[in-house]
Image (spheres, rainbow, N blue to C red):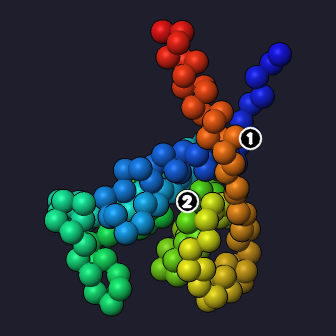
Amino acid sequence: MANKRMPWNQYFMLQSVLLSMRSTCPRLFVGALVIRNRRIIAGGYNGSVAHEDHCIDVGCLMRDGHCLRTIHAEMNALTQCAKFGVQTEGAEIYVTHFPCLQCTKLIIQAGISKIHYQKDYHNDPYALKLIEKSGIELDQVNLSVDDAHTLVNFLENEQATE
């Protein structure tokens, strides 16, 4: 019996979940993956600005209900593209949580053509309006327990063959 290959959406979303495990702000673990032509061009997770203390080490720096120390996963992934000169026009982004308003604006300005997200998270009505006006496609990707089991079984089989 041949193994069934994991669909692209689940594959990329699971990679976003894996990225989220590197998050350094305990308020929310978010991962983002930018892809173009089914190739990963950047990844990010929410965490501190370079050379700043991490929330997991010194606590969150809160103002008006937001952690000032944290750069969102989408921002980290897109600024990584800018830093290394990688084009984002027409790319897609996979995010574990629906993007906030500021990340939505950045995604639009970066020329992202499709947002794939796993979980609803304070979906801002204005962000939804901006996404619709910009023509960006929205796709909620559902990960099932079977997707996680497929990954675990694959890893276990790989270890068994070593």
Give the image location of residue 146, x and y in percent.
Answer: 70, 40
Number of numbered discs: 2
Drawn side of residue 110 relative to residue 62, left or right: right
**Snapshot quadrant of residue 122:** bottom right
Residue at the right extreme, as displayed: 1
- Pick the quarter of the image with the N terminus: top right
10 Å neighbourhood of mark 1: few (<14), some, or many (≥20)? few
Mark 1 highlights which residue?
Answer: 7
Q: Is residue 2 left or right of residue 100?
A: right
Name above or below for residue 138 compared with residue 88.
below
Q: Is residue 125 visible?
A: yes
Q: Amino acid at mark 1?
A: Pro
Residue in the picture at 54% in, 9% down: 161
Q: Within 10 angstroms of label 2, few (less than 14), some, or many (20 or more) residues?
A: many
Residue farthest to the top, as pictured: 162
State yes or no: discs 2 and 1 in contact (Cβ < 8 Å): no
| Mark 2 vs 1, N-terminal side | 1
Q: Residue at x 66, y 45 (%)?
A: 145
Left or right of residue 27: residue 140 = right
Q: Residue at label 2?
A: 96
Question: Which structural element holds mark 2?
Answer: strand
Residue name at image x 78 percent, y 28 percent = 4
